[in-house]
Every structure is written in C-alpha cells, then in structure tokens.
Image (tube, rainbow, N blue to C red):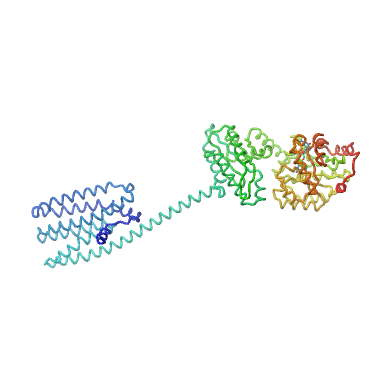
C-alpha cells in the first residue's frame, strides 16, 4: 500500500502552492505546443527511413496515433486562456501532464526498442540520436515541471544506456557514457534553475501579498481619516467632502435641492463638567444612535465635533417634511437617556438651510445652518428652525450695523440711560442699572442687544465697555452717595485681562465710590472660561466692586456655578416674571430662587416687573428688590435724577437693613 502511495505521490502537485502552480502552468501553456511540434517533426523524420524495413504498426499506426495525441494536446494548450482556469484545474492539469509525460516516455522507449530490432547500425545511431535530441528538447520545454523533466530523463536514459553498453562496438559504449554524463549535468542544471524559479515566484507572491496588505492598510487609513472614532459616524472632513461633491454635482441643475442641518445638544458641556468625559462620551454615542434611527439610511448624519452633528438630506423633501424631521429629532432627544451614571435628560436644537435657494455653496450652507441653529437657541430652544429670508434680512442688517460700527465716533454716539432698581419694602430706589444706547447718524437708534452682539463678534466690545464705564461713572458721580450703579460686562471683557486692567484703572480714577459699583455678568459669560472669568471678577472685587449674576434662569442655572463664582447679587430673568401672576409653577420657581438667595446671603433682584399684579405676587413670595417698566423704563441721566426726587423716594416706610445702608 505504502509503495503504491509513494508511486502516486510522484505525480502529486502541492495544492497550497497556488501562485507557483499558476506560474508553472503559465510557462507550460507557452512551451507545450512547441514541445509537441518538436516531437511530431522528430518522430516523422525518424520513422521515414524505417518505412518498409520495419512493420507498419511501428512506422505508420503508432506514429499516427501519437501524432493525433500531440496535435490535440498542442491545440488544447493553444486555446487555453490562463485567467479562465481555476486553481484546482491548474493542479489537475499539472498532475495530468506529469502522468502523461511518464506514459509517453515509456511508449517512446518501447517503440524505439522495437525499432532497434529492425535497424542496422546506422539506423540504430539515428534512433539513439532521435531519442536524445527529443529528450533534451522536451526536458527544456518542461523546465517548470521538474518532476516531468526528471522522470523523462530517467525513463529514456537508463534503458538506452544499458542497451548501448550491451552493444559490442566501442562507439556505442562511448555514446552510453556520454549520454549518462550529459543527462546528469542537465538534471543538475534543471534543479538549480527550478530552485531559482520557485524562489522568484515566492518572492513575487510575497510582494503581491505585501502590496495587497498595504492597499488594505491604505483603505483602512482613508476610512479612519473620514470617520469619527467615538460614534463611528462620518466626521467633519467627510461631511464637507460630501457637501462639496454634492453641490458640485448639482451645478447646472437648478431644480435639484438639498438640505443641510446642524444639530447641537443643549447643555452638553454641563453634563461633561459634572459627570465627566466617559459619561459625556456615552451620551454622544447614544445620541448618534438615536439620531441615526430617526434619519434612516437615506439621510447623511455626521459628527462635526463636540456635541455638534451635521445632516445632509438629498432626497427631494419639501420644507414641511424637513421641519417634521427636525421635530422628530428634537422629540427623540427629549426622551430619557440611560447612561453609566444614571438616567439623564437633554434637549437638542437644530437649524436647517436649503440649497440652492438660501445658500449656494458649502461654506454658506454651513454658516446659514449654523445661523438658524443659533437663532433657534436664542428664540425657540429645543425646536428646529429653517433659514429663511427673514434671517437673511437680519444678517444684512447686522452687516450694515457692523459697517457703521466700524466708522462710528463711539465717544460721541454712545450714551447711557439708567433704569432704577427699587426696594419695594422700603419704597426706595437702591440704585440704577446703566444701559448702553447708540445713536448713529445713518441708522438712528440701534437696539442695544443688536449692536452689543455685533461689537462682540467684531472683537471691539472692550472699546465699548471702556467708553461706557467712563461715561456711566461720570454721570453717577452726580448721584447721592448711597446709590449703587449696575454695569453690564460682556463675555469677551471677562476673557481679556487687558480690558479688566483698563476697567480697574477707570474705577481708580473715578470719584464714584467703587463699593457702589456692581458688575453684571451672565452665566454663559462665566462658563466660557470659568477660571479666567473668576480671576477677572476677583480682581474687580479687590477694587471694592460687587458682582451680580444677570439673567439667572436662562443659561444653565447650575448651582455649582453659583457657588464657585464670587457673587453678591443674583438677578432673576424677566422671562419668569411674565407669567408669575398666572402660572403657579413659575411662582414656585421664583420663590425657590428667592429662598436660595436668602440662604446663600445674596441679594435677589427681580427683573422685568411690568404690572402691579406681578409686583403683588412678588411681595407675597418674599421678593424685595425689583427692576422693571412698572417703576420706570430706562431713562436719560437727567430724568433719573428727577425720578429720585419723585414721590417714590420721599416717604420710605421702613429703615434700610444694615447691609443695604452700606450702599
Ligand atoms: P440686560 O442686562 O438684561 O438689561 C435689561 C434689559 O431689560 C434692558 O434692555 C431693559 O430695558 C429691559 N427691561 C427692563 N425692565 C423691563 C420690563 O419690565 N419689561 C421689558 N420687556 N424689558 C425690560 P435693553 O436696554 O434693551 O438692553 C438689552 C441688553 O443689552 C441688556 O440686557 C444687556 O444684555 C445688553 N446691554 C445693554 N447695555 C449694555 C452695556 O453697557 N454693556 C453690555 N455688555 N451689554 C449691555
Ligand atoms: Ca443687566
Ligand atoms: Ca438681565
């Protein structure tokens, strides 16, 4: 059994050497037709002198059968297309060739021996010549299937050597020895060549493999460079690449539309600050999953960075549908999130813009979607907003404001109005809030929230603050010394040490007592850069000034901020007061804030009181310090002085608490 197996192994071709087998086969396809051609020609030239002297089966029938086999095999190989042959077929064909070469060698040697029988010495030499020359031709054609070449040599050389050695004539013996030596040399050359050949093929396939890996690596690199690692969504670069490609492909197709959306979480920074980054990451991953499930496959969702997500809607959707998608997104975000630190709630705001109607290039699409998002954050937090012509008008107006601000003579055009802050228990004016006014020769009176924001965006707000503080202090010097003056600071003022030092120097130079100055700052201003803002406020407090937290309730209203800031006062935003006499919940919230201030030893000022009914509710829940149209709108300095001498201040019902009399 073992012996048979060994014999069978001779014909075996290693299936695992896929590349090597393919290379061998490729060489074979080119060389085998040539080999059969040589065999055919040699066989015909051999038999021709023997026709008549040897029997027909040796000179006609056997050569005829062999010729048919040669031609068929040669044609078969000529028609082979390498790429169409599978790896398994190649293995089969190679082993088949080895088997056939052994069989044909035996046929040839037996046939030649039969011919010897009918030959004279000259013919014998011819046959031996035929055998050797054919053998060497075949061996070179079969170079790449080393087994075939070696078996062929053995099968032909060994019997012919023995036969020639048995002949008497010394020439035959010499030929025998000669053939043995040459064939040994040829086998040696063959094995060497084959070794080189296999080495080269392996090296080549290794290179191919390396290149394949490098390509895979490159593909993976490109994928990673375009993917957000945390959420596995497309990243900012990918988002803009898609947007660029899409807008370019829509050029010349005015009817094709797309919508770009920007979504931002409301209060994500707070969650990150309070619960730490792992929880923040967890929230971002869950957010991306939630958004993706609302948007589906057809809409692109990308993470642009932080808590900002980008959306591209290409399927033709009218703006009503887009609004509905936006509402679904905000709705989905309002549901509880189950995170590693427990269940949390967060809202999201989204802004959309349509291409090409409202923006016609990627940059403008992004800017306008961002504008719609910011607009929504300010006016309808937690709801979608689509960029419209109204927004375009606002942008245009802002651009005009910015242009006029550039050219304005600020010292001349800026002025101050004062709004009183009243102690309702004592019916006494405690102080005034200084509010900026800008009267421009071209634009007339511009709303302060508009020009302040423009100045902030232009980076020139500090110039305004310095001019305004100087003017406000100068005017306040005319007041009775027990009144305080509240002055608003911007985010950018707090972030600029240079501005703070300027303010300190203005305070020092002023005759108005610094302990009567209150700087009003908002939570967003402080949150921007908490450490720096706190440092700035401390510096102002060192001058004796006080600090009030403005618009409380509109920002994050986090107690941790209230505690960390060096506060003296807190101003409840007027949005609470609107409903205080009609909505019980609002009333309770305001009551809690007043209690909180009492506990933290902070003065609590209630802004935006417009009606008597609101004032009565406030008095009932313990509110004491009030600012609003009910008492007075902001007024020019001269009117403020008149207001002081009005009836309100003439009959204080009660004496001031000790803390207040210091003001
Ligand atoms: P703010 O600091 O919250 O100022 C209070 C605003 O509420 C003032 O608007 C005031 O006129 C208004 N207000 C007061 N009582 C009532 C009321 O009963 N009902 C209603 N509806 N409104 C009331 P104003 O003067 O238009 O100022 C708007 C905002 O502009 C200010 O809000 C402040 O953020 C900013 N601002 C004004 N002056 C300055 C300034 O000198 N520097 C800085 N950085 N910002 C300023
Ligand atoms: Ca204020
Ligand atoms: Ca305010």
Left or right of 179: which side holds 346? right
The quadrant in which the N terminus is found is bottom left
Q: Which of 660 and 145 is in front in this view?
A: 660
On the image, which quarter does residue 108 sit in?
Answer: bottom left
Residue 387: percent from left, percent from top? 63, 35
Give the residue drawn at x 70%, y 43%: 458
Residue 133: percent from left, percent from top? 20, 58
Left or right of 440: which side holds 212? left
Left or right of 393: which side holds 155? left
Q: Which of 464 and 20 is in front in this view?
A: 20
Left or right of 68: which side holds 224? right
Q: Quadrant of ligand 2?
A: top right
Give the residue drawn at x 87%, y 48%: 658
Q: Nearer the viewer, residue 161 or 439?
A: 161
Residue 538: percent from left, percent from top? 77, 53
Q: Where 321 sits versus 92, above or below?
A: above
Q: Where 167 sits versus 656, above or below?
A: below
């Amino acid at each position: 059994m073992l012996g048979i197996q060994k014999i069978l192994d001779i014909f075996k071709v290693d299936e695992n050497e896929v590349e090597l087998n393919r290379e061998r086969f490729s060489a074979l396809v080119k060389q085998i037709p040539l080999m059969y051609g040589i065999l055919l020609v040699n066989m015909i030239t051999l038999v021709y002198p023997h026709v008549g002297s040897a029997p027909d089966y040796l000179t006609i029938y056997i050569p005829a059968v062999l010729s048919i086999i040669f031609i068929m095999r040669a044609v078969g190989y000529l028609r082979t297309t390498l790429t169409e042959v599978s790896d398994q077929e190649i293995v089969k064909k190679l082993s088949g060739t080895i088997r056939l070469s052994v069989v044909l060698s035996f046929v040839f040697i037996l046939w030649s021996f039969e011919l010897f029988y009918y030959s004279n010495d000259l013919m014998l030499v011819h046959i031996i010549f035929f055998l050797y020359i054919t053998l060497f031709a075949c061996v070179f054609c079969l170079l790449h299937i080393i087994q075939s070449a070696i078996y062929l040599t053995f099968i032909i050389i060994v019997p012919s050597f023995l036969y020639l050695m048995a002949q008497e004539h010394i020439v035959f013996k010499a030929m025998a020895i000669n053939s043995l030596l040459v064939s040994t040399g040829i086998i040696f050359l063959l094995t060497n060549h084959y070794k080189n050949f296999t080495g080269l093929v392996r090296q080549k396939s290794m290179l191919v493999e390396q290149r394949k890996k490098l390509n895979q690596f490159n593909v993976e690199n490109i994928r990673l460079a375009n993917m957000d690692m945390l959420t596995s969504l497309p990243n900012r670069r990918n988002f803009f690449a898609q947007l660029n490609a899409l807008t370019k492909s829509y050029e010349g197709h005015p009817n094709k539309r797309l919508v770009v959306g920007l979504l931002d979480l409301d209060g994500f920074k707070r969650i990150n600050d309070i619960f730490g980054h792992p929880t923040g990451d967890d929230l971002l991953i869950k957010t991306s999953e939630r958004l993706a499930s609302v948007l589906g496959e057809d809409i692109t969702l990308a993470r642009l960075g932080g808590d900002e997500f980008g959306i591209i809607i290409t399927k033709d959707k009218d703006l009503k549908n887009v609004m509905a998608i936006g509402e679904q997104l905000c709705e989905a975000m309002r549901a509880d999130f189950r995170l590693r630190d427990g269940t949390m709630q967060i809202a999201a705001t989204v802004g959309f813009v349509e291409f090409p109607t409202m923006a016609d290039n990627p940059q403008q699409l992004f800017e306008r979607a961002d504008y719609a998002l910011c607009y929504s954050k300010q006016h309808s937090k937690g709801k979608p907003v689509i960029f419209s012509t109204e927004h375009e008008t606002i942008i245009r107006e802002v651009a005009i404001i910015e242009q006029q601000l550039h050219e304005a003579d600020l010292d001349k055009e800026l002025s101050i109005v004062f709004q009183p802050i009243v102690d309702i228990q004592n019916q006494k004016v405690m102080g005034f809030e200084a509010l900026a006014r800008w009267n421009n020769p071209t634009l007339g009176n511009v709303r302060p929230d508009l020009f302040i924001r423009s100045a902030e965006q232009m980076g020139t707000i500090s110039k305004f603050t310095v001019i305004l503080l100087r003017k406000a202090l100068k005017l306040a010097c005319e007041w009775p010394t027990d009144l305080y003056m509240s002055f608003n600071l911007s985010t950018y003022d707090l972030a600029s040490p240079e501005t703070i030092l300027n303010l300190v120097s203005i305070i020092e130079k002023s005759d108005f007592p610094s302990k009567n100055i209150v700087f009003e700052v908002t939570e967003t201003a402080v949150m921007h850069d908490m450490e720096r803002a706190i440092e700035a406020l401390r510096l102002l407090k060192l001058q004796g000034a006080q600090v009030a937290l403005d618009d409380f309730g509109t920002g994050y209203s986090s107690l941790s901020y209230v505690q960390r800031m060096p506060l003296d006062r807190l101003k409840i935003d007027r949005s609470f007061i609107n409903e205080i006499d009609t909505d019980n919940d609002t009333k309770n919230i305001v009551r809690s804030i007043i209690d909180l201030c009492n506990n933290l030893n902070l003065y609590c000022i209630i802004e935006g009181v417009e009606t008597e009914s609101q004032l009565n509710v406030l008095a009932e829940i313990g509110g004491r310090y009030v600012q609003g149209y009910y008492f007075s709108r902001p007024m020019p300095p001269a009117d403020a002085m008149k207001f002081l001498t009005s009836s309100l201040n003439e009959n204080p019902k009660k004496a001031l608490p000790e803390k207040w009399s210091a003001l």
